[in-house]
Image: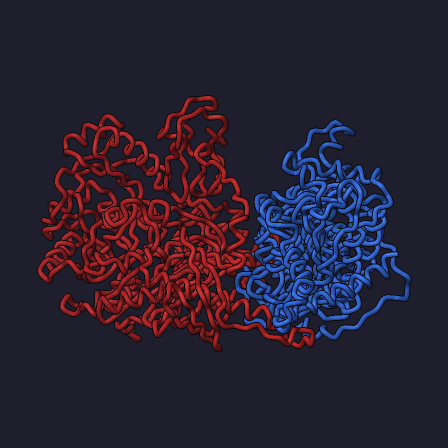
Chain colours: A blue, B red
Amino acid sequence: GTGPRSLARLARAVSGGVAGLARAAGWERGRVSDSAARLVPQEKRRAALLGGGQARIDSQHKRGKLTARERILLLLDPDSFVEYDMFVEHRCADFGMESDQNKYPGDSVVTGQGRINGRLAYVFSQVFFCFVLVGQMHNSKFNLPRVMFSLSWAGSDCSSCLISSLCLYLQIMDQAVMVGAPVIGLNDSGGARIQEGVESLAGYADIFLRNVLCSGVVPQISLIMGPCAGGAVYSPALTDFTFMVKDTSYLFITGPDVVKSVTNEDVTQEQLGGAKTHTAVSGVAHRAFENDIDALLNLREFFNYLPLSNRDPAPVRKCHDPSNRLVPELDTVVPMESTKAYDMVDIVHSIVDEREFFEIMPSYARNMIVGFARMNGRTVGILGNQPKVASGCLDINSSVKGARFVRFCDAFNIPLITFVDVPGFLPGTAQEYGGIIRHGAKLLFAFAEATVPKITIITRKAYGGAYDVMSSKHLRGDVNYAWPTAEVAVMGAKGAVQIIFRGKETDAEAEYVNKFANPFPAAVRGFVDDIIEPSTTRIRICRDLEVLASKMQSNPWKKHANIPL
Amino acid sequence: MAASLRQVVAGSWRQPQRYLLALQCATHHTRWCLITSRTFYTAEYDPNEKVTFEKLLIANRGEIASDDKTCKKRAIKTVALCTDLSAGAVHVKMADEAVCVGPAPTSKSYLNMDAIMEAIKKTRAQAVHPGYGFLSENKEFARRLASEGVTFIGPDTHAIQAMGDKIESKLLAKNAKVNTIPGFDGVVKDADEAVRIAREIGYPVMIKASAGGGGKGMRIAWNDEETREGFRFSSQEAASSFGDDRLLIEKFIDNPRHIEIQVLADKHDNALWLNERECSIQRRNQKVVEEAPSTFLDPETRRAMGEQAVALAKAVKYSSAGTVEFLVDTKKSFYFLEMNTRLQVEHPITECITGLDLVQEMIRVAKGYPLRHKQADIPINGWAVECRVYAEDPYKSFGLPSIGRLSQYQEPLHVPNVRVDSGIQEGSDISIYYDPMISKLITYGSDRAEALQRMEEALDNYVIRGVTHNIALLREVIIHPRFVQGDVSTKFLPDVYPDGFKGHKLTDLEKRELLAIATSLYMAEQLRSQQFLGSPRISLAKLDLNNWELSIQLGDGTYPVTVSNNGSTFSVEVDGMKLNVTSEWNLASPLLSVTIDGTQRTIQCLSRDAAGNISIQFLGTVYKLRILTKLAAELSKYMPEKAVEDTTSILRSPMPGVVVAVSVKPADLVSEGQEVCVIEAMKMQNSMIAAKTGKATSKNLRGSWQHAGNPSCNL
C-alpha cells in the first residue's frame, strides 16, 4: 500500500532535510571524514531545486513558461514556502525509466504550504517535463493527447512514480482540510507517464475524491499553466475556480489527433481547449491571464478575497474608502428610456471599495456579471444582470454561471449583493430545447438555498419569473431595495398590453406603465424594503452588511439538497 | 413637437414618478460648486433697482446655461431647455423649470426655433438669454422674439445682422475707421470662384463660413488645390452647423496673435471697452488657453484697440455685451476680424480683472437701464487665466473629441482663487452631439505668475475620469517657457509641437520623482493587502520591509529601485539617489498629495492592477509604469511576446462620429494618402486617409455611427 511507503519517505525526507540544514549552517564543517556521506542530501536538494536539470528549465522557459518552483516563488510571500517531500523520486523501472539519469528528486510535482499576504495556502505545482514526453516534445508538441489516451496499455506492475506524486497531492489536501486553508493547484502536466499503467488511473480517482471531499470545506483553485488533458482535466473541473494562461495552456479530454480520427474535425489545440475557448465558449475556465507572471500575481490578488475555509468568515481587509461615501454618479446612470442599455459594471465599480471588482467569467454569458469585491473592507459576492448584453436576460448559460457563483459564496460565508435589471428569461426553441427550465431552476435553487446575507438592488426592470429568481424578498432576501427607476411587474408594458388585449387597438400601454412600471406596487406589498436614492446605495449596503454580519440561518436537516443538475 | 413639449411640461408622460424622483435625487453638490466658485465680482447690485424680469429662458445648454447665478441672486426664475438626451443635465437641475425641445441632434433641438418659441409661450418667459453658439447670433431668432414681445438679452436685430454677416461687418468697420484686413472679398458660389478670389487676394488665404463664429468651418489655403478642398469642407460644415453655406475668403495674416476687446453698450448711446483678452493659444482655430490682460499690449495699443471697438459698437447702435476680435501682428498693428454679438465663452476672465458681472449687465441693459460705469472706472486688477478643459485626446492633432461617461469628477475648488464653470457632473455623458467642452477653468492672481501657478495647481487637482481629457496639453502650455514669457501666436501649438503633442518630457529629476512615487504607491498597496482586520489566522512573522528590490518599467527603460519603509515615509533609491516620499497613502482617494524630499506634488493614480501595471498622472501627463519584484522582473524575460495587430491595413475612426462621405468603393485600388472617407464628429469633419496602398475590401455604410477605433475600412 502507499501508506507505509509514504511514511517511510517522509521520515527519510525529514532526516535528510535536517542533515542538509545542519550542513548548510556549517555546524559540522570540521568532520572531513563524514563529509562525503553528508554531501548526499545536499546534492539531492540542489538537484531537486533544479527540478530536472538546467536543460529542462531552459526548455520550459523557451516555451514561454516558468518552472514549477519559479511559479511557487512568485505566488507565495517571500521566504514563506515550506516544501514537503522534496526527495521523492519515481521508482519506475520499465521502458528505460530505470536509468539513473532519468531519476530526479521532486521530479513531477512540488508541494507544500506557504503564505499569500500572510495567509496560509497549500500549493502543488506540477513539473511539466515528464520524461517520455521530453524527447518527443522537441519533435512535435502536439502529441500529448495521444500519450494521455493510451494510458491503458501501459504495464501495470511498475512501482509507480506517478502514484508517489499523487500521494503528495492527497497529503496536502488532507492537511488543508484539517487546518482549514485553501488548496491551489498550478497545473502543467504532460499527463501520466504511460509506463506507470493502471495505477495512475486509481491515483487520479483518489485525487478526484479528495477534490470532492474538500469541496465546500476549503476553497480550491486551479491555475492551468500548460497542457492538461485526459482524465487529469477533471481535477480542475472539480475545484471552485479554474484560471488559465493565454496561449500556453490547454484543457481537453481528447486532443486534436483523436478528434481528427474520431469525428474527422480539424481543430488546433488552441481552438479545442485554449484559454479563449474555455473562458468564452465552454465556460470551463473562469478567467484567463496574459502569461505566467500575470496569472500568478492576479491569483495573489484573487486569494485575498477568499476566506481560508468554510469555518472562517469572509475576510475584512483594511479599507480607505469611506463607507458613507455618496455616489452622485448613480443618480443618472440608468437612462430615462427603459429600452436604452447601460453598463452594470459601471454601477458595481462606483459602489464597491476603491472601484476594485474581480470579475469571474467576464467573457462567458456576459448578460450576467459575477465577481468579488469589497464593501467597507469585507469581501462580498456581486451578481448583476448586464443590460448591455442581450438586455440582461436570463438564459441557460447565465443561469448556470450565476448559480455556481452563488453556491460558492454561500459555502464560504461571503455575503451576496445582487443588482437586478432583468427583462425575463430568454424565449425561444434553442433555450427551451436546451433546458432553460432545468438550468434556470439552478439559479433559483441556489439563491433560495443560500443562507449568507443577501442584499438586492433593483435598478430597473424586474419582470416575471426572473424577478423571483434574482434574490427576491420571497427567496429570503434580507434587504431588498428599489431605485426610483425600478419596475417590478409581470412583464413589460408593450407585451402585457398585447396579450391582455390580443391585438385590439388600445392605449392601455400608458395605463399599464403608470400602474406597474414603477417601484410602488412592489413597495406597498413589502416586496422591496425601501425605494432609495441611487447615490445612497453604498451607504445602505455597508450599513446593512454590518447588521447582517452576525446573521444565523439554517436550512432543514438533510443529507444534501438535490439541485436540478 | 407639441408632443415632446407636453412630455416634459407634465413630467415624463411615460413615467411621472420616475421624473419626479429623479429630480429629487439630484445632488446639491454641483449646484454648490457653481455657486461657491464665483467670488470675483466687485460691482455691487443696486438693491433699489427694480426686479428686471420675472422669468428668463436660457436657450442653451451646458455651463453657460448653468451660469444663472445672476438670476439666482436677483430672484429671477429660470427656464432651461433640454433634449431627450440631456434631461438629467446640471443646467436642467439648476433651473426652476425645464422644457424638452426635441431629440439630441442640435439641429432638431437647440437650433429648432419653432420648439423654442413654443417653450417660451408655454412657460411665459419674458426674456431669453441665448448664451453663446446655437441661436445666440441668429437674427431671425431675435426677430421672432421681438414679434412675440419677448426680450432678447443681447443686441437688437440690426446689430446682429450687421455683425453676423462677415462682409457687411467689414464694410461697417471700414466706415467706422476700424483697421481691417487687406484683401477682403465677397460671397463664394463654387470652387472655381473660390480659386479665382484666392488668387486675387494672394496666398495664403483663409476660407470660412460667413455665418460661423470662432474657428468653425475655417480653413487656410496656400494654393489652388487647398482652396478647392477648403471650399468643399467649409461649405459642408457651414451648412451642417449654421444652415447657411455662404463663405468668406480673405488674406491670411501669418503668425498673428488673437486679441479681443470686450465691449459693453447700453441703449442710451453709452459704450465701454472692458480691456482685452489674449486668446492666441488655439488649436484648429479654436481657443484653448485665454488670459486677461495680454502680455503684449502696451497702454497705447490697448486704448487704440478699445476706442476702435467702441467706435464700431456705436456705429451699429450696439447694446449689450459684445466682443470685437482683432488679429495683432508682431509690430502691434491690429486688424479687425469680427465682432461677436454675444457673451463669449471666455468672458469670466474679463469679469475677474474688471470686477463686473457681465450677465448682470446684459440683463440690465436689455431692460433699458443705462450703464453704471465710466471708462475711467474700468480697472485691470490682477491677472486671470482660463483653460478650456475638453473631453478630447490631446495626443491626436492637439485634441480629437472623445466620448464617455464621467465616472468620477471632482473640480479643484479647494485651490484658492479658482473658478470652474461647468455644465456637467459626475455621471454625465459626453456625447457626440455637442461641443466636447467639460468646463472652463479660471484662476486669478495678483499677477500673472500667481495666476499661472494657481492654474498649475488647479489642473493637477482636477479629477476627470471616464473620458479622455486635455489637461496634459493645458498644463504643458502654461508652463512652457515661450508661454511664460508671453511669446505666443495663434500658431503656438504647431510651432512648439511640430510633431504633435507628446506629453510632458520628464527631466532626470522628475523621472526619479515619478519612479519614487510609483514605488511608494506600490509598496503602500502591498502593505495594505496584508492588513486583515479581526482575523487571528494571519502570520505573525511580519515581512521585512527594508531594502525591497523592485524593478520598474517606464517607457522603454527598466529601472531597478530599492525601497525601505518607515511609517508613512518610503525611502526609495533610484539610480543611486535616495528620495524620501511621504504621504497619507490613501489608496481610495483620486488625488494623492505626496512630498518628495520637501517638494509637494499632487498626483492621481488612474489605475493599478494585480500584475503591477500602474498609471499615474504626474505633472499633468499620464504615465504607464509596470512595477515588479526583482524576481518577477527577471523571470518576465521568459514571457512570450504577444503578436500585435497590423493596423496599417485597417482604417480606424480616430474618434466616435458619423461617416458623412465615402470616396472609395469595395475593390477600388487605394493609394497611400488617398482620402477614403470623411467622418463627422462634434461638428468637425475629418478626412480619413489610407496608410498604405492596397485594395479596399470592406467599408461601413455611409451615415453609420462609428466608435473610436472602429475599423471603417479594410485595405
Q: Is residue A222 left or right of residue B162?
A: right
> How many circles with numbers are drawn on the protein?
0
Picture quarter containing residue B284?
top left
- Residue drawn at x 64%, y 75% as measured from the top left: B533
- Residue drawn at x 61%, y 53% as measured from the top left: A295
Residue B221 image point, x, y percent: 23, 35
Above or below, comparing residue B341 to residue A548 in the picture: above
Front residue (pair B25, B398): B398
- Residue drawn at x 55%, y 52% as measured from the top left: B7
Front residue (pair B160, A105): A105
Residue B644 image point, x, y percent: 49, 40
Residue B163 image point, x, y percent: 22, 47
Is any part of residue B232 visible from this angle?
yes
- Residue drawn at x 80%, y 37% as measured from the top left: A150
Q: Is residue A103 left or right of residue A197?
A: left
* Residue placed furthest toward the front: A33
Is any part of residue A454 visible from this angle?
no
Front residue (pair B526, B222): B526
Above or below, comparing residue A275 to residue A186 in the picture: above
